[in-house]
Image (spheres, rainbow, N blue to C red):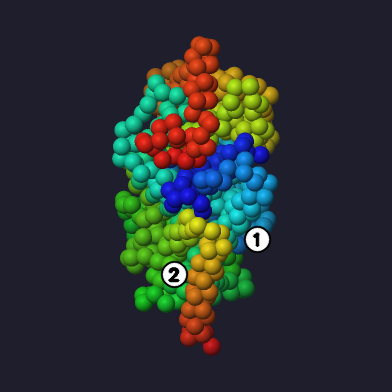
Amino acid sequence: MKGSFRQSMAWLHTWSGLIVGWVLFSIFVTGTASYYRPDISRWMRPEFTRVEPVEAPALGAAAERAVAYLGTHAAQARTWFIGLPQPDKPVLDLFWRTRPGAPPGHVLLDPRTGTESSVRDTQGGDFLYRFHFELHMPPLWGRWVVGICAMIMLVALISGIVTHKRIFADFFTFRRGKAPRRSWLDAHNVTGVLALPFHLMITYTGIITLATFYMPWGVTAAYKGNAQAFFTEASWITTPRPPAKQAAPLAPIGPMVEQARAARSEPLERLMIVNPGDANATVVAVFEEPHGLSHEHPQIAFDGVSGAILEVRDGGLKPAAKTFTVMTGLHEGHFAGTMLRLLFFLCGIMGCAMIATGVVLWSLARLPKAGERPFLGLRLVQALNVGSIAGLPAAVAVYFLANRLLPVDLAGREEWEIRAFFGAWIVAALVPLARPQRRAWCEGLAAVSVLCLAVVAADILTIPDHPLRRAGGDPLFAWFDGAMLLLAGLFALAARKVLRYEAPKKAHKNEHERDRAAKPAPVPAAAQPARRPEPTHA
Amino acid sequence: MAAGGRTPGKGPGKGPGKEPGRSRALERAGVAGRVVLAAGGGYGVAALATALLSLTLPMARSEAVATATLLSFAVMAGIVVLVFATRTALRALLIVAGTALVLGALLWLAMGGSAP
């Protein structure tokens, strides 16, 4: 492009960032929340805290009940997935697919009786987790959109790094009292640069988690497109067995579970039964990941008819295959203990802040001069900024609120929670279109704060086991509410800042004049020509 | 849509005041072309490189595929940066097309060796 390499990169950074900024923001927010997916899921199913955990020796009998249920309700399915009861999720989690394209079946069972669990119907943290990479769209579409956004994020990161000649000095620069644009730019730089290793890591490893989906051409060339063969050779999965097209009864699953438990020290996580009822049926027992960075579950495959062990998969990956699983592991952060998880979470928050300050910066740099009318695009960007930066957190809060307030036995409760989420988001995105910019920010941020407080109130009022109401209650509720209070405080603070900022009319006017003084030059950086190269950035 | 003087790549002496209609339209066409080239060309080159490396890297088949796939997104990001950094859109097109042709030819040779 015209101008220097750095100028063209600044342009690329500005526009690529704006175009996917809002989608990226929602990917980052839901992804950051997903570091606490099990905790969110457990909070959203408060009935679990009253259920006794299933002892390991009882897993075999529980698995038998799951198979009995699937045999009557999903006999035609090609694969059954059975999530075994875990200490923090004491139910059987059944999932099956009949054929591609058909909606999958999903049900939770009581492991002691084999009947459908009475726990409230919700997707819990899984909704946020799936939204993170599918945006609640049909999976193929959603994954492509997220992949494209992630790729653009990668490009925006690279071009952003190039744009910063003084990346180290910028790191210590925060010009708070200066023109608002400078403070925003510095905030964008600090959140971007401070967590830069995290941002680069999380973006690249995020793409890698779905790499063979986005870039299947290596598999096409070397394996004639047979991905299963590649996964098997890479030692990621046990060897798949095609159906024999001959009926044969499934052997009792209890002894297989016992055998699997005796073989390894890790807890047994789930069972996968491929081609049930076929002579070539395979039962794969999947264990929890051993401690370590890599995302690889030990697996044992059984012949479904004879019950004999076919194959044991336990590490031993070659370097490139191992790099793959380590990258996936890094992205998901299963290995992280409490403190490291918190650090990942905070880095994720910084990513959200980086994107938020970035899109705000775009609109600030294009504010009309005094007396000029804002152009339509600017109005739209401004409204979308409020609609996503305040709107999405509001929608998440409403999702939590719906979980507590909807009647427990409501039909289609799970869908209603999600409708509440999108309903709130749509409202939050439309209202700013009709409001003056500053008021919209103030109202949006304040609304998030109030909604977070409402979540805490609803939690305390509807949960009899809440630690505030009963000594010895599950501390999870207190932790969750504490986090909500913290968020409420942060958003209230932000709303107050916006409100306060508007108050001194005179200062506001002066700023406009200062802005105008800097404007006439085609390159706004002319205000500080020697210091910062930021041709289109500001 | 953008306010005056907000078009990308403001070179000296090329302000919107000079020859507004024509130069801006040209500039926009150039930008649009680059976007298409970066997306299509970037993905195409990355895909060709992945397929080629998968067949030719001197290691086990699964390792070659894994290595090539791991690298592919860095290749694509590199091409995108290159497309936007090159001085003219035409030159970017030539570089990308040339790379794709070379990779395609090598891939054709590699496949000719491995498949009957």
Q: Quadrant of residue B16?
A: top right
> Circle 1 — which element?
loop
Q: Is residue A154 visible?
A: no
Q: How far across and how far down the image is residue A477, in percent?
A: 44, 26
Describe the element under mark 2 as helix, strand or loop. Answer: helix
Relative vertical location of residue B115 with respect to residue A465 in this rendering, above or below? below
A14 left or right of B18? left
Residue A160 seen in render: yes
Disc 2: which residue: B65
Nearer to me, A420 or A112: A420
Residue type for callout 1: Arg
> Residue visible at 34% across and 31% down?
A173
At 39% across and 70% down in the image, what residue appears? Answer: B63
Which of the two residues, A335 or B23, is positioned nearer the viewer here?
A: B23
Residue under circle 1?
Answer: A99
Between marks 2 and 1 in the image, the one whose residue lies nearer the viewer: 2
Q: Residues within 10 Å of mark 1 (few under 14, many from 20)?
A: few
